[in-house]
Amino acid sequence: MEKIGIFYSFNSHKTKLIGEKIIESFNEGEIEAVNAETISEEDFLKYNRLILGVPTWFDGEFPNYWDEFVPALEELDLTGKKIAIYGLADQKGYPENFGDAVGLMADLVRKCGAEVVGETSVEGYDFERSKALQNGKFIGLILDQENQARLTPERLNMWIGELKKNF
């Protein structure tokens, strides 16, 4: 079976912990972790099923390491690839751009031909706006470890179940 590539910063503590939980939820050896801080075009093209850990920084921005890869990513042909995106965000500290980086990444990889999978419910969240909100759902999984950490295990398990169906 083809491996799944999971891309996240190995130095971003909370995003890394979620990435490790995702890896543990799949069969051993089914997923390969790739450090998003040292990503190359070849790394990205190696997989047909990808999971991207994209936390939202500051006022709805990509982390530096993803932002630096965007120009290269914009040039890739991702036709035939399925991509799921998760991100951490703070709905109380940044309610006007909650989880925006997930939505920005989804829009970007779609423009390159990828199919984005793994949308989730907005039920239980309290925010004003989000670029990750598309057609009444989040286009990926948004986790708020600052304010709703107790809900993370259930949200994560439900999302992983959906990914396994879609991958």
Image: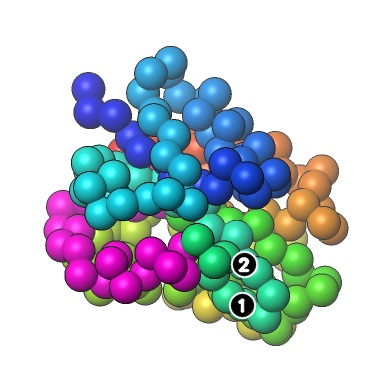
From the viewer's perspective, tell me whether residue 64 is left or right of residue 107. right
Q: Is 124 situated left or right of 6 in this image?
A: right
Marking on residue 42: none
Q: Are marks 2 and 1 in contact (CB under 8 Å)?
A: yes
Residue 64 x/y as whole percent: 54, 66
> What amino acid is at disc 1?
Gly
Query: Which residue appears at 54% of the width and 24% of the height?
Result: 24
Res 41 → quadrant: bottom left
Specify few, some or many for label 1: CA neighbours under 10 Å numbering under 14, 14-19, or 20 or more: many
- Provide the residue designation for mark 1: 60
Is any atom of residue 116 visible in this view? yes
Disc 2 crowd, CA 10 A, few/some/many (<14, 14-19, 20+): many
- Disc number for residue 56: 2
Q: Using the rendered view, name the quadrant where residue 109 is placed.
A: bottom left
Q: Quadrant of the image for the N terminus?
A: top left
Q: Is residue 128 above or below residue 123?
A: below
Helix or strand or loop: what does disc 1 sit on?
A: loop
Q: Which residues are magenta?
A: 66-84
Mark 2 to mark 1 CA distance (whole Å): 6 Å
Q: Is residue 78 above or below residue 61?
A: above
